[in-house]
Image (cartoon, grey):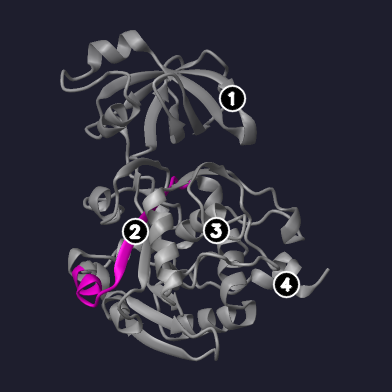
Amino acid sequence: MSGAEDVTAYDYPLPEASIAQEPLKRRDAARMLVLHRATGQIEHRHVRDLPMYFTAGDLLVSNDTRVRPARLVGRRKETGGRWEGLVLAADRTAWKLLAKTRGRVQPGERIVLVDREGRDAEELVMCERAEGGSWVAMLDPVASRTKQADDGDPADADHVLGRVGRVPLPGYIRGGVEQAGDLERYQTVFAAASGSAAAPTAGLHFTPELLAAWEAGGMQQARVTLHVGLDTFRPISTEAIAEHPMHTEWCTCPTETVAAVDAAHAAGRRVLAVGTTTVRTLESAARSGRVEPFAGPTDLYIRPGFSFHAVDCLLTNFHMPRTTLLVLVSCFAGRERVLRAYAEAIEQGYRLLSYGDAMLIV
C-alpha cells in the first residue's frame, strides 16, 4: 500500500485550542490561507480579498442547500429517560434519524419531543432500525394535529422541525450545544433548498457585500445543491482509504449551471468551487468526462488517482484529520502541500473546522 493510500497519511496534530468555538461577527473577515498548486507558495489573506485572485469571466459555484434545525431533544414516554436525536432525512411519511439515550429503544416506543421553550410539542413513534445504526420513525398524526399551530401543514417535516428542532452543530463546537444566534449564523447566504444535516461550511464566509464585489469584477455565479449528511464528517474507519465505505448524498447540478461551467471553460476561464460539497456535486455531474445535468444520489469518493473535469480552484475550510474531506482536498492540491499548509495555519493561529477560517487553492 502506497503512503497516499494509508489513512495515517491524512493525519495531523490538531490542538483543541485551534478549533473555532464561535463564528466571527463579520463573515468575510475570516483569514484565508492561499495555496498555489503550481508552486506550493502560501499567502495569508482574508476572505474579503477573494476577488483579487480572479478575473472577469471566472465562475463561482456554490451549494445552495439549507440546514434543517435537525437536532431533537425529548424523553421516552414510558420511562421519562432523556432522549436525543438527529434527523438525517425526512418527508411526510417517515423520518430517518440517529438516536441516543440510556438503555435500548424498542420498535413501537414513543418519544415526546420538547420545543425550544421546554414544552411538550410532538410525539415520534420509533418504527424500525435502519442501516448504519439509524432509525426510521414517524410523527404521531393525532398528537401532531392537536399540538400543531394553525399556520402550516402538520405533516410537513420542515414545519415541525422549525418548532422543535435545534441547530445541528458538530460536537466539537461547544459539545453541540446551541446558543443564541446559531440558528442564523450556521446558514450560508446561498441557502435555499432545505435538507442538510450540516452546513456546507465554506459558504459560511460569504456576505452580500463580498458577492457584490465578485460581480463588480465581471465574475459569474452559479448554484448546485448537495444535502450534507453526517457521514461527510466521519473519520475514515479503515487502514486503507480505498476500503472506507463511502456515504451517499443527494445532489443536483442543473442545466443552467452546466451551461455556465461550459461557457467559462470555453473562454479559458476558471471554475471556483465553494466547498468540498460543491466539488463533489460538479465532479459527480462530470463522471463522463464533461459536465452534464445531474440529479440524484452520489457515492463519488475523490481519492488519489481521481481526475478532475469540472473544478479549477477551491475555497474550503480546514478539515478534521483522517476524513474523506481531507483526502479530497489533498487529491486536488497534493497531500504534502496541503499538510504543510495545515501546519503553517496552526502555527499562525488560524481558527479551524466549521466556524473557522478558510483556505483558497488556486
Image point (56%, 48%), residue name: 231
The secondary structure type at the circle numbered 3 is helix
Residue 321 visible in the picture: no
Depth check, mark 4 against mark 1: the one in front is 4
Instruction: Give the image location of residue 351, x and y in percent.
Output: 39, 73
Distance in Å between CA atoms under marks 2 and 4: 33 Å
Mark closer to the chain start, 3 or 2: 2
Distance in Å between CA atoms under marks 4 and 3: 21 Å
Image point (42%, 83%), residue name: 34
Disc 1 to disc 3: CB gap under 8 Å: no
Q: Amino acid at mark 2?
A: Ala
Q: Amino acid at mark 1?
A: Arg
| Left or right: residue 14 compared with residue 245 | left
Image point (29%, 50%), residue name: 191
Q: Nearer the viewer, residue 223 or 66?
A: 223
Q: Which mark is residue 283?
A: 3
Distance in Å between CA atoms under marks 1 and 3: 41 Å
Mark closer to the chain start, 4 or 1: 4
Q: Residue furthest top?
A: 142
Bounds of the magenta segment: 212-228
Name the residue beneath numbered marker 2: 222
The reply to whether the magenta stretch includes residue 222 is yes
The secondary structure type at the circle numbered 1 is loop
Name the residue beneath numbered marker 4: 4
Rendered position, 283 above or below 230:
below
